[in-house]
Amino acid sequence: MREYLIKRLIVSIFIIWVIASLNFVIFQIVSPIKPEYTLLDPNFTPAVRRALAELYGLNEPLHIRYILYLRNMFTWKFGRSFETMRPVAEEMAWRLPNTVMLLGSALICTILVGIPLGILAASRRGTKIDVATIGAGLFTWGVPTFFIQLLFLLFFAYYVTQFLGFTLLPSRGIYSIPPPTEPLALIADIIWHLTLPLITLVVASFGSWALYTRNIMLDAITQDYITTARAKGLSERTVLYRHAFRSILPPIATMIAMAVPGIVTGAMITEYLFTLPGIGQWYLTALMQSNYPVVQAVLFMYAVLMIIGNLIADLAYGVLDPRIRVGQRR
Amino acid sequence: MECWTHVYGWDKEGRRLEGMSFLLTREGRIIWTRRIKGFWEEFRRKKIGLAGLFIVLVFVFMAIFAPWLTPYDPLASERVADGFAVPQWMMIFPQYADLATTRATSIYWEVEEGSKFIKEWGQNILVNFEAETTDTVTAAFTFEYAYSQKVPPDAFYCEFEWKGEEVENSRYLLKLYIVNPVGNSTLLWILPGSWRDTNGGEAVHVDSTNWELLKRLGLQLGVDNLGREVFAVGEGNYNFILEILFKPQAIGAKCEIHFKDTTFVTLGHVHGILGCDNAGADIWAQLVYGARVSLMIGIMAAAIATFLGITVGITSGFLGGVVDETLMRIVDILLCLPLLPLLLALVALFGKSVFYIVLFVAIFGWQGLSRVIRSSVLSLRESTFIECAKAAGASRFYIMVKHLLPNVLPIAFASLVLSVPAAILFEATLSFLGFGDPRSPTWGKMLHHAFGFGGFSHLAWWWILPPGFAITFLCIAFVFMGSAVDEVVNPRLRRRR
């Protein structure tokens, strides 16, 4: 087990290094748009241009820049933003909570809706609930998330507001302007602003969770030991939750571990649509302004999170399912 | 249908032929035709697949016959009606029944005064002034315009072309008025810079929303509406008056004025099948042409990705060893990349064009397929016919292309159909976030514009719903078709009953 863990860690760090290097190659070597064009405005005086070039290390040779870049990435500092001239890490620090708050609660809600629904559908196979669950799963497969969000935005923010004459659910921002001063009122205000994005995220993704749970649960409850448990006279509830559900825990834990990086990466469209000041919106703006330190930092962070998620998913599987002891010879 | 996984047959002399070489014989073609027929027989029993195929065909029809389905060019964004005009068929509902429609009128001028100099009138005016005294002479024309709609239009425009030639020792001036039934006259256009003494001419577009025009009339942009001011009375006879003034400097001064092809258009609040966007461009045209781009990007990206997946899968599975290890590690790394952010970054860096979007979507879309094909090749590699081919001295390339490729084609085909919607969705998402090709009309771009230019605050559902549903239907249709194809060609994966 330990041997496997170390091997996986080394491979993960290697992949992180490859991705960091790719990040460097794409933005500093292959890219047709050089920072010299975007950052160093020709209208600046030579002294300012020199100072800027020095601040961003543009005068250094390529290999020094690469080493500086790697140091920046692995120490989680990320350099300075072209746009605001402030450290990227600092800018990321106040945006990250917004994103995590929205998508973390969305993930929790999705799991809380999706998994029980999947179990219910599997236990009532062939009924309307089952058909509806399959339908919801296929629906989320084919319908683009942003379109679901656009629909909700159109109907719940704009049509309802026009119909009622006052704002039921706000369509943009994370708090009212100006924000309320009392802490409780502020929290309520933020919850009010996050309701609509949260609902849209849950609606857009609970179907696939439910469908996945249903499928593995169906596999589990058609096994012989479930029949045995039923034959023993256990209640259906006990059979479902104590026996069948326990056996599907490993794949579900895997799925959750794989979804956790999405807490940070999955927000781009939602934040764009609802004008929330989070990582995704910051990334889009940075792309449009050719603000590469920010773009590199966000991409790197996304990749690292995904790799860690994969690693945890693999390990969780081994821990939760004693049948699979990774690294041990059978 | 199991025969799909083993492609072989016999030629006339009874020799056994395998793989693609078998296709080259007549018998081979017959058997392949039979197989395709067999595939179709089985496919058409799947209702869901047929439904998908039908929807896809509808979109293909839209894409091919786009120029016949709409007269407008989606990229020119011609102003065909007022901004946010509602679809025409909405007029069956009472609250929309009274809305104005777009009306275009060609103006045929009639002579009012100064007839001595007027050589031509009607659609094209020609006035030939020749001074006998130094008095100012006016040639005036009128046109009676019957406005037959109850509501005033929010906007109108007037187009014409004027030309002043052979100007000698004289100055001229052109003025265009509109007089409403009550008698209020509005000076729509006056020759820029007032009196002129040189030759000149241009095509003029007088727009009621033009701020210079509004300023000259003492109106404020965004507050006053010229269309409503002029047509406040509604139904009735309006008069257009064109005055051509001639001021000779000496006796014998000359001047020739042309005034051509005057059209007057009032922009309505209803238009066409799907109304208009914020700039008054036809939405149906954008939707129809959008099908072209979506289908093309989806199918091309999926085809390239499938090709890459097949190549990598077969190479990696058949050659094994270092090649396999390297390729699979590359697949691992690619699977770790955050796809959407990376695509956005690459498109933003290398250029927002259809070519790059197809390329990048394809480059990041083959990993899953290559793994599946690799595992299938791993088992095929051990089978007898490959052993035989090896023993007969076939080269590795020959085996890969002639023996392995035909056997993995069914899997690849199912994957091809299933990866089209993913490519379409990626393109739509990129366009929606503003990273689409600005020179091609796409559904994602329509949504991007609807979101950015007030489609939501105007509750313009006809601008938001059609592209969204088009993307949705096309993707779901491909998913349906793909799962049906998958069930037919991979019988092992058939769902348990």
Image: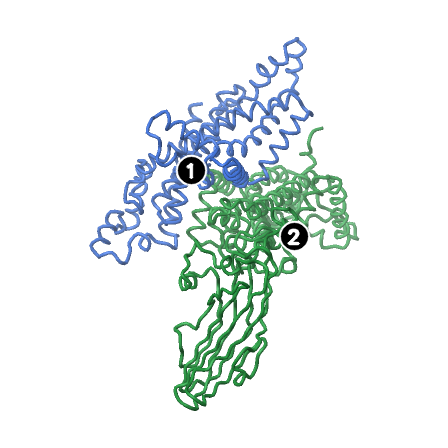
- Give the chain letter for green: B
Chain letter, blue? A
Q: Secondary structure at mark 1?
A: helix
Q: Is residue A15 visible?
A: no
- Pointer 1 chain: A
Q: From the viewer's perspective, is B379 left or right of B240? A: right
Q: Nearer the viewer, residue B496 or A239?
A: A239
Q: Residues within 10 Å of mark 1 (few under 14, many from 20)?
A: many
- Rendered residue at 54%/34% (across/down): A204
Residue annotated with mark 2: B60
Locate the C terminus of chain B by quadrant: top right
Along the line of sight, which residue is nearer the eye, B98 or B123? B98
Q: Residues within 10 Å of mark 2 (few under 14, many from 20)?
A: some
Which amino acid lies under the numbered mark 1 shown in the image of this protein?
Answer: Ala
Q: Quadrant of the N terminus of chain B?
A: top right
Measured as percent of width and height from the top left, residue A302 is found at 42, 37
Chain letter for mark 2, please.
B
Which of label 1 and label 2 is nearer to you?
2
Q: State the residue position of label 1.
A: A303
Instruction: Using the numbered discs, state the Cα–Cα distance from disc 1 to disc 2 in whole angstroms.
Output: 38 Å
Quarter location, residue B245:
bottom left
Q: Is residue A298 left or right of residue A123?
A: left
Q: Is residue B93 left or right of residue B258?
A: right
